[in-house]
Every structure is written in structure tokens, then in C-alpha cells.
Image (tube, rainbow, N blue to C red):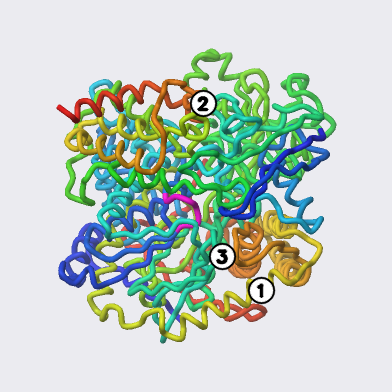
């Protein structure tokens, strides 16, 4: 199939970017979206032009590196799918496709489709852990965790930290991301001891980093490639309230 | 030269405990005076950096991704082994040790494998304490499942994302140390050289992937935890950024590269769809429990829909060739058998490089819903990639490069032959021999990071004075100048071929001539072709853009340049090893029924190569392998 792409090009963080239009021809429906972009880049290089810079790594939907807004939807809008797992059979011959980077104040653009997601790191560093030491911990079966709790923790822990939740939120909120870690550790006995400090510190870090607040649009849940549920945001709010009393 | 792994002597059961006592310690007040550089933040690097930081060392950690959480350990699916014996089914440290030695086809160092089995139990406890949500039963106890190469259930798992959860555990420990100020992270930073002064590792040169700036970092010790090199085949299950670069830069500065020809080709991956494919996706090996592998008996049937090929015209080749093991033949056998059928022009699907994995018999026997319960998520993933429903039409699978057992040579302390340079996880060669068992990669990464390097590095640091050589030493400037020269060279070739075109060419040679089955002739052909491609690369590659900016083409070009040198040593190792063992299969060395034939008399050693320069013969150093606790035997699949 032949496609018309409108791709966000921006040389550096301080430069003004704009959409450039490219034609790609002979795309196979079995190709992944990123392989289609690889083709475009091969053409650009051969034409002596600078290829489009985009983040990607594992190409199997788990590393969370890829970060593109396709036709206005983070990761392209297909249910539980990252950009690297999006395949060209979802498109039709002659389609026009708009490709943009994550857009959020907390994620400054570095080049083309690459953004700086360090703000997510800062949130995690502010408390997304249990303060256990290496070695000297109890036997794994000394702490019993009923299956429903283990499953709940795992549902939250599936987050890949891509930032699609932020990119799709009208407020650029990182509540889904933050809540997933808070909820995972709050439900487990290992994490309960520090639950109050954790939720307080992570929430503060989230606001300090320039992420907005949740106003219940649920766009994050729609965009999340791992299907993280907004119920964890409710849990975050509840944990936050609990930390005050 | 005969290499000494410095493994402790005496009863193996006491070897690690005794060694821990024998090693020197660093006083708590002195630890902060030592700076340790950790390259790579996967399971080994992340766990190592966090643990060393917690001990009080001054740690700096580097990764090329934008976050430490994205290292490719995250993609591991199945699980992690440990000798807990929770199911009461007869497991023990000794059994895990024995299975690992045997699974590796008797080409690993006994003491290292014993230690791995011993600390495996601590790993599970550590991960639980971090909040890793392992699968549990309704009573709240940890759940186990079975995996290949073992008769006990010793695999712990977190759905199909065990690697992700373990890495996020290590990442959380690392984040805690970043907050505490003991670890400084350098994301989007790639190591491009090792700095060695008077034969001792003293630091690294890195490229900041955002600004393009070359930076020098000194360290009292340098630890590489930089993963494997199977992207030398171009198409593999590795992430796009996985490369041999860090390890190869160390090799060019004198570190020996051990057993580079030991690579694991995983039998169940989704086949290539065409020439434009960028990577391959693994499907869990558990699928072969209920699936039957077949190809058409007649070439002319290959284009027919599988449902139109009658039973009598199908060749269930694994059942035919290995009647007692059938579809559950071990990884290396199953992979080679699939290749043979396709070489015989009876492969199916695009490019005819695929075989069917058929569930119809199992569905008829237990029903579709049971199959869905067992493998539903894998069928879903398969459908997402291929757009085919595997309940109705057999899956197509093909083997793909997955893991490298070879790596930089290290002694029992995980230190290379270059003092001050340590190597952890997949990047070293130590515990998997010539073949790795499923669910053992995660175990090794975390063992090395949490429970080995924190002890063994102290033994080295206790004998040196901290901070004697810093960035102002001329060796750092020399290194930066050299890297800069190479980068400028790459940017000024302005040839006609792209980096990925040349990488594909290298991959094709490596796959066809040094892949699943190798022969004297094929390896000699590879050794002729690799320098030709390397010459073309340095004369005809087109790397666009500039050095001082984000330049992904330049990153890829640098990695390919290293693969093009490394590939030659890889092929030489495969050519010299005149035997078949584990993942290394030489067609000349097989039994009448196609099984690998080891030659223990002549090849029971680790082959560690010293790189002497491009176009020069590398020198082979041998570390003899002694088996005092496990009897050497032929692995039988009958």
C-alpha cells in the first residue's frame, strides 16, 4: 500500500518544529508501524536527508520505549497495543497518517519524535520501592499473600512506564502511572509499612514535575497499552487521604 | 596460555561459603572513597548497582535507554529457577547444579554453577521483599511451574512477564539508591571505549546520546553488565539496541572473549514475514507441550492451505526422527530439525522459512477452551503479529537467535583477565556452558548482581588505593581522541549503502554459515565474507547527520562496526571447535542419527580469544574444565 505521512520534525529542544509530509510506497500489511518508519528512513538517507528520530527498542511491546501519537491517539489507539505492535494491516492504501511525539509540559521534545521522560523517573525515585536491603530478608513463603491480592498487585505492576497516559490526558496528568506503583505496593504486606510516606512523596514529586491533576476523563485507561485500570487512581486518592489521618 | 579460573578447591558444597570468608573486605568508612562504574542496568547491572550503592560505594550507572527500567531483561517471559523445593518434589541445590551443568553440555565451570544454584534461593526472597508480584496460590504461597531440562517444578513466575517484574524490582532498588545519593544514573549514554592504564581498567569513555558529547569517567573498578551479542545475526529476539559494543571495546583493550560460538537458537519464534523485518518475536517454548510440528511431505504442497493437505501427506518430522522425545525434543535439536525441513524446500509461509505447529490433535483431545486456558495469551500475541487464528489454522514458527552463552572471560570472582574489569550476567561466559536451560538467564543476572559482585569486588578494591587515576590522566584523552576519529571517519564516508543494509548482509552470512549448523566449509566461507562486508562498510556506508546531536544512524553504525570485527572471532571459534556441543553444532561431528558428538578428550576447555587487531590472528587461551562432582556423560534424548 502507499501512504502519505505527516511527521513532526524538530531539530532540537529549542527549535520550532513542524509537520513534514512524506510519501511511502510499497508498504506490506505484515510490517509493523515502526518497520514502515524504518522504510521511510532508508529512503530519506538515500535521498541525503536526515532520518526521523524516534524511540524504540524491544519491539515486542514491553520495554515502554516507543512513544508516538498516531492520528491523535497515543500508540495509535488500538486496544492494548504499543506502537511497535501496531501493524500496517490496520491501515488502508492511500491513508494519510499524522505522527507526533508525546506532548506534555513535563516531557520536553528532544528531537523529532523523541521526548525526555525523566520526570517519570523522579516520581519513581521519590518512593516507588520498599526499603529492603539486599540480603537478610525473610523467606519468600514467610509472607503469605492471598491470590486476589497478588493478582491485584500484578495488574498494577504491568505498567511499562511509556507515558501514554500522560500524553493522552487533557491535563497531562501522571496519575495512572503513579497510582499503579502506589497501589501495587499498598496492597502487599511488604509495602504497607511505608505506604503513607510513599503516597505523599510520590504525589508531591508528580506535581513538582509539572504533571496535571486527574479530572476523570479516563483517556489514560483507553490509551494504556497494558490496560491499567483507573480504579488504581481511586486507590491512590484513598491512600493519599489515609496518609493524612 | 593456560587460564586459571581461580575456582576454590575442596568440597563443592562449602566452596562459596569458604571463599566468602577467605576474601578481603573493605571497611565501611572506606567504601565511599571507591568509585565503581556500572555499565548496563538490566537484571545484573541494576541489581549490582543498587546493592553496591547500598553498601556505601560511590556508584555511577550507565544505560543507552532513556530509563534504567527498559533494559532487555524486561522481555523475558517464562520464569526464574530456584532450588527452594517448595513443591516437595525432590529438588535441591545439588540437583539444580547438576541440571545446569548437564544442560550446558558439560562446558561450564563447576564452582560457578554451584554458587549460582546456592544463591538462587536468596534471589526469590529478595524479590518477594521488594514487592515483586510472583504468582501465588489461594492460600498465599508462592506457585511453581515446570520448565525444560528439569524433572522438578522449580520455576517461579509472574504471569508471562517474569523478566519485567524482576527488572522492575531491581529498578526500584536502584531508584531508592538514586534518591539516597549513592548511585548516579547516566541514561541515554553509551559506553564507547574502556580506558586501561598499565594493564588495569581505570574508566570508560561514553557518548551522551542526546548531545553527542564524548565524556570520560574514571572508576576504581569498571563493571560490564551489557548483555548478549546475538544481534550479530541481525534478526534475533534481542532489542534493537542490544550490541556487542561494550564487551568488544573491552576485548580490544585486552579482555579475552570466551566461547563466542556458543549461541542459543530458540525453536519457537514467529517466522520472518519478509525482507523488511527488523526483529523476531519469541513465543514461549511451553507451546510445544500440546502442539505438533509438521511440514508437507511434498514440495508442491507447500503453497496449499494447511487444511487442504491430508494427514498422509504431512511429515511430523520431530515425531518421525525422535520417536521417544517427539515434539518435546530439546531446543537445539528442535531448531536444527526445523531448519533441515526448510533447507529441503518443504518450509511453509512467506519465504518458505517456517514450519507448522498444529494444535488440532490437542483441541480434539481436550477441547478448545482447555487449550485457550493454557496458551490463550500466546495465541493472542500470535494473532496480533500474523493476523491468523491459531485455533483454526496451525501456527507457523521458525527458530531465531535468542541468547549468547559465550561472553567475556571471567574468573570465579567475575573479574576478567584485565584487573579492575568485572563482567556480569549474559555479558560473561561463566555458567551456561554451551547451552542455557530455560528460566536460568534471570537467575544468573540477579545472582551476579545481588549476591556475587558485592562480595567479590571488595576483594579487589581492598588491595588498591582509591582514586589514584582520574580523568586528567592522558589515557582518557587518548581514548576520547580515538573515538572522535572513528566517528568522524564514519560520518565522512558518504557511501551508497545504509547501516541496516550492511547489517542485514552480515546477518545473512552469520545465519547461513555460522548459525544453527556449521561446517568447515560454511565457516570458511563466512571468514571470507565477513572481512569483505567490513571493507565495504568502511568504504561505502552512508551515515547521515552530525556527531554533536541525537544521531541514531551513527549509534547503529558504531555498533555494526564492532559486530563486523567480533563476527570474525565468532566464526574462528566455531571453526576451531572440532566437536558439537549444546548450541554449537558442527555437521562433521554428529552421530549416525544426527545427535551432537562432543569430544571431551580434546575440547573440554573454555576457549578464550585474545584480539590482536583487525586482520591479525587472535590468540587462543585455554581454561581446562575439570569435572569432579558431575560425571561426564552423553546427553541422550532417546
Q: Residue at x 36, y 38 (%)?
A: B155
Q: Is residue B199 left or right of residue B533?
A: left
Q: Quadrant of residue B220?
A: bottom left
The x and y percentages for residue B474 are: 46, 86
Q: Gap in Å between the C-alphas at discs 1 and 2?
A: 47 Å
Question: Looking at the image, is mark 1 or mark 3 earlier in the sequence?
Answer: 3
Prevailing secondary structure of the magenta residues: loop
Residue corresponding to mark 1: B488
Question: Looking at the image, is mark 1 or mark 2 earlier in the sequence?
Answer: 2
Q: Quadrant of residue B396?
A: top right
Mark 1 vs mark 3: tell me if same chain: yes
The x and y percentages for residue B199 are: 42, 83
Relative depth, front residue between B19 and B541 = B541
Question: Looking at the image, is mark 2 or mark 3 earlier in the sequence?
Answer: 3
- Circle nearer the viewer, 1 or 3: 3
Label 3 sits on a secondary structure element that is loop
* Residue B66 drawn in magenta: yes
Relative depth, front residue between A89 and B394 = A89
Q: Residue at x 62, y 67 (%)?
A: B547
Q: Residue at x 75, y 46 (%)?
A: A40
For the image, the number of numbered tags is 3
Contact flag, marks 2 and 3 (Cβ < 8 Å): no
- Circle nearer the viewer, 1 or 2: 1
Q: Does residue B597 appear anywhere in the picture?
A: no
Residue corresponding to mark 2: B377
How busy is the neighbourhood of tag 1: few (under 14 within 10 Å), some, or many (20 plus)? Answer: few
Q: Find the magenta span and give its range.
A: B63-68
Residue corresponding to mark 3: B212
Q: Is residue A139 above or below residue A216?
A: below
The x and y percentages for residue B160 are: 45, 33
Amino acid at each position: 500500500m502507499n501512504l502519505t505521512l505527516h511527521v513532526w520534525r524538530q531539530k532540537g529542544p529549542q527549535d520550532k518544529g513542524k509537520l513534514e509530509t512524506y510519501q511511502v510506497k510499497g508498504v506490506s500489511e505484515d510490517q509493523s508501524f515502526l518497520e514502515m518508519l524504518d522504510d521511510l528512513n532508508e529512503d530519506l538517507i538515500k535521498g541525503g536527508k536526515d532520518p526521523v528520530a524516534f524511540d524504540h527498542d524491544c519491539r515486542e511491546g514491553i520495554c515502554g520505549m516507543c512513544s508516538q501519537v498516531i492520528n491523535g491517539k497515543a500508540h495509535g489507539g488500538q486496544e492494548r497495543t504499543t506502537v511497535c505492535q501496531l501493524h500496517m494491516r490496520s491501515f488502508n492504501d492511500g491513508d494519510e497518517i499524522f505522527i507526533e511525539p508525546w506532548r506534555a509540559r513535563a516531557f520536553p521534545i528532544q528531537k523529532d519524535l523523541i521526548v525526555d521522560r525523566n520526570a517519570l523517573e523522579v516520581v519513581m525515585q521519590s518512593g516507588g520501592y520498599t526499603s529492603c536491603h539486599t540480603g537478610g530478608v525473610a523467606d519468600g513463603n514467610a509472607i503469605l499473600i492471598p491470590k486476589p491480592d497478588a493478582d491485584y498487585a500484578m495488574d498494577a505492576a504491568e505498567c511499562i512506564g511509556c507515558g501514554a497516559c500522560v500524553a493522552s490526558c487533557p491535563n497531562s496528568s501522571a496519575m495512572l502511572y503513579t497510582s499503579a506503583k502506589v497501589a501495587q505496593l499498598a496492597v502487599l504486606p511488604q509495602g504497607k509499612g511505608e505506604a503513607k510516606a510513599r503516597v505523599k512523596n510520590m504525589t508531591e514529586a508528580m506535581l513538582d514535575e509539572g504533571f496535571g491533576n486527574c479530572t476523570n476523563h479516563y483517556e489514560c485507561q483507553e490509551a494504556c497499552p497494558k490496560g491499567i485500570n483507573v480504579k488504581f487512581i481511586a486507590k491512590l486518592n484513598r491512600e493519599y487521604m489515609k496518609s493524612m489521618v | 596460555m593456560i587460564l586459571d579460573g581461580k575456582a576454590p578447591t575442596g568440597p563443592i558444597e562449602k566452596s562459596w561459603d569458604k571463599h566468602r570468608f577467605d576474601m578481603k573486605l573493605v571497611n565501611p568508612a572506606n567504601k565511599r572513597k571507591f568509585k565503581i562504574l556500572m555499565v548496563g542496568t538490566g537484571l545484573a547491572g541494576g541489581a549490582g548497582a543498587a546493592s553496591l550503592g547500598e553498601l556505601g560505594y560511590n556508584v555511577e550507572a550507565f544505560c543507552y535507554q532513556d530509563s534504567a527500567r527498559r533494559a532487555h531483561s524486561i522481555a523475558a517471559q517464562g520464569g526464574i529457577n530456584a532450588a527452594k523445593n517448595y513443591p516437595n518434589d525432590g529438588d535441591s541445590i545439588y540437583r539444580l547444579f547438576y541440571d545446569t551443568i548437564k544442560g550446558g553440555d558439560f562446558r561450564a565451570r563447576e564452582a560457578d554453577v554451584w554458587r549460582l544454584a546456592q544463591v538462587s534461593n536468596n534471589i526469590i526472597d529478595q524479590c518477594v521483599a521488594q514487592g515483586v508480584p510472583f504468582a501465588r496460590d489461594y492460600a498465599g504461597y508462592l506457585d511453581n511451574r515446570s520448565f525444560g531440562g528439569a524433572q522438578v517444578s522449580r520455576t517461579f513466575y509472574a504471569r508471562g512477564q517474569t523478566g519485567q517484574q524482576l527488572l522492575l524490582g531491581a529498578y526500584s532498588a536502584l531508584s531508592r539508591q538514586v534518591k539516597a545519593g549513592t548511585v548516579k544514573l547516566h541514561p541515554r549514554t553509551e559506553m564507547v571505549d574502556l580506558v586501561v592504564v598499565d594493564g588495569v581498567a581505570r574508566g570508560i569513555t561514553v557518548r551522551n546520546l542526546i548531545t553527542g558529547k564524548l565524556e570520560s569517567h574514571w572508576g576504581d573498578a569498571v563493571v560490564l553488565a551489557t548483555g548478549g551479542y546475538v544481534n550479530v545475526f541481525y534478526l534475533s529476539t534481542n532489542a534493537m539496541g542490544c550490541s556487542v559494543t561494550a564487551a568488544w571495546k573491552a576485548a580490544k583493550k585486552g579482555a579475552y572473549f570466551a566461547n563466542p560460538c556458543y549461541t542459543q537458537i530458540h525453536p519457537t519464534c514467529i517466522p520472518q514475514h519478509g525482507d523488511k523485518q527488523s526483529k523476531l518475536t519469541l513465543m514461549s517454548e511451553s507451546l510445544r507441550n500440546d502442539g505438533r510440528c509438521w511440514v508437507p511431505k511434498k514440495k508442491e504442497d507447500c503453497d496449499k492451505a494447511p487444511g487442504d493437505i491430508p494427514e498422509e501427506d504431512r511429515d511430523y518430522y520431530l515425531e518421525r526422527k525422535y520417536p521417544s522425545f517427539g515434539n518435546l525434543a530439546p531446543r537445539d535439536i528442535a531448531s536444527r530439525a526445523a531448519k533441515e525441513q526448510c533447507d529441503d524446500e518443504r518450509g511453509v509461509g512467506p519465504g518458505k522459512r517456517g514450519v507448522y505447529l498444529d494444535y488440532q490433535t490437542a483441541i480434539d483431545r481436550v477441547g478448545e477452551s482447555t487449550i485457550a486456558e493454557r496458551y490463550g495469551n500466546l495465541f493472542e500475541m500470535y494473532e496480533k503479529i500474523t493476523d491468523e487464528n491459531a485455533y483454526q489454522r496451525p501456527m507457523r514458527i521458525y527458530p531465531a537467535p535468542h541468547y549468547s552463552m559465550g561472553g567475556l572471560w571471567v574468573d570465579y570472582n567475575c573479574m576478567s583477565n584485565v584487573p579492575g574489569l568485572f563482567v556480569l550476567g549474559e555479558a560473561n561466559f561463566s555458567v551456561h556452558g554451551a547451552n542455557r536451560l530455560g528460566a536460568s538467564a534471570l537467575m544468573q543476572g540477579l545472582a551476579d548482581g545481588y549476591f556475587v559482585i558485592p562480595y567479590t569486588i571488595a576483594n579487589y578494591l581492598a588491595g588498591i588505593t582509591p582514586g589514584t587515576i582520574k580523568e586528567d590522566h592522558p589515557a582518557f584523552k587518548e581514548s576520547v581522541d580515538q573515538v572522535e576519529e572513528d566517528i568522524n571517519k564514519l560520518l565522512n564516508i558518504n557511501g551508497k549503502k545504509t547501516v541496516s543494509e550492511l547489517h542485514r548482509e552480515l546477518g545473512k552470512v552469520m545465519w547461513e554459515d555460522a548459525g544453527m549448523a556449521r561446517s568447515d566449509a560454511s565457516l570458511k566461507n563466512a571468514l571470507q565474507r565477513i572481512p569483505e562486508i567490513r571493507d565495504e562498510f568502511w568504504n561505502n556506508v552512508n551515515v547521515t547527520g552530525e556527531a554533536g546531536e541525537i544521531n541514531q544512524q551513527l549509534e547503529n553504525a558504531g555498533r555494526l562496526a564492532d559486530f563486523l570485527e567480533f563476527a570474525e572471532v565468532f566464526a574462528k571459534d566455531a571453526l576451531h571447535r572440532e566437536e558439537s556441543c549444546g548450541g554449537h553444532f558442527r555437521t562433521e561431528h554428529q552421530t549416525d542419527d544426527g545427535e551432537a558428538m562432543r569430544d571431551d578428550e580434546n575440547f573440554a576447555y573454555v576457549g578464550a580469544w585474545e584480539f590482536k587487531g583487525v586482520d591479525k590472528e587472535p590468540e587462543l587461551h585455554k581454561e581446562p574444565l575439570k569435572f569432579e562432582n558431575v560425571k561426564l556423560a552423553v546427553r541422550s534424548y532417546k
